[in-house]
Amino acid sequence: MSDSLVIIPTYNEKENIEKIIRKVFSLPYYFEILIIDDGSPDGTAQIVKGLQDEFPMLHIEERKGKLGLGTAYIHGFKWALAKDYEYIFEMDADFSHNPDDLIKLRDACVNGADVAIGSRYVKGVNVVNWPMGRVLMSYFASMYVRIITRINIQDATAGFKCYTRKVLQTIPMEKIKFVGYAFQIEMKFTAIKYGFNVVEVPIIFTDRTEGTSKMSTRIFREAFLGVIQMKVNSWFRNYKR
């Protein structure tokens, strides 16, 4: 059994899912994979289950309906904590996150980080194939988060991360409220409020070439308003470990 689990939420990722699984299992360090599939009508889950005989450390949890990114990760975190994994990763299925960078994120945690973020903006702007409007929206969203929350994270909306086990054991998951991209902001903010060492590891983010993006204006609206709500709520919470 590996000490490292990569959680990949999926909804209609049939074009990417087998390729991403094979790529992760080809890495020089041995990672296990947990797919959280939200009832993909395109047969994503069936593709995963068809690979389980070949890859015994490939796991899948199926949920009924599209329940949101945040709840998918929380489901995966609880699954991971019930096992003996020390390093728990978030990664997209569409190759926007380069699986090779899993090793860099794990190394950062092995060497003292409690949370390692695959950051697009810690060394300039490292984004490939995004339209300029989306690059600017993402970049200034992170700036907005820094202004409101006072956390020094350059890529606050990043979804490529490694958590050490103790972080996920400490954060009360029932108090994580957001389900879209605001979930990514809330998890970073909460980890920092608990005093954990959160570091950014530079990566190159490449937009998906296959499948359909799940981004929407509703997701950005939740993040914009949610940051203010999250900051206000933090004034009334105790973050002692």
Image (tube, rainbow, N blue to C red):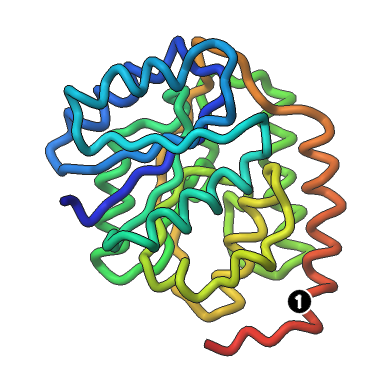
Determine whether, in the image, residue 191 is placed left or right of residue 145.
left
Residue located 55% across and 70% down the image = 191
Closer-to-camera residue (195/183):
183
Name the image quarter holding residue 139: top right
Q: Position of residue 172 (x, y in %)?
A: 59, 71
Residue nearest the observer in this picture, 11 or 104: 11
Q: Is residue 22 above or below residue 194?
A: above
- The amino acid marked with disc number 1 is Ser
* Residue depicted at 44% across the width and 50% down the height: 161
Please provide percent x and percent y for residue 82.
37, 62
- Observer-nearest of 190 and 60: 60
Q: Residue at x 43, y 32 (%)?
A: 97
- Residue 213: horizontal and vertical position, in percent? 63, 20
Above or below 192: residue 228: above
- Residue of label 1: 234
Q: Nearer the viewer, residue 230 or 81?
A: 81
Residue density around tag 1, few if under 14, some if 14–19, many if 20 or more, within 10 Å: some
Q: With 198 as the anchor, is 99 left or right in this view?
A: left
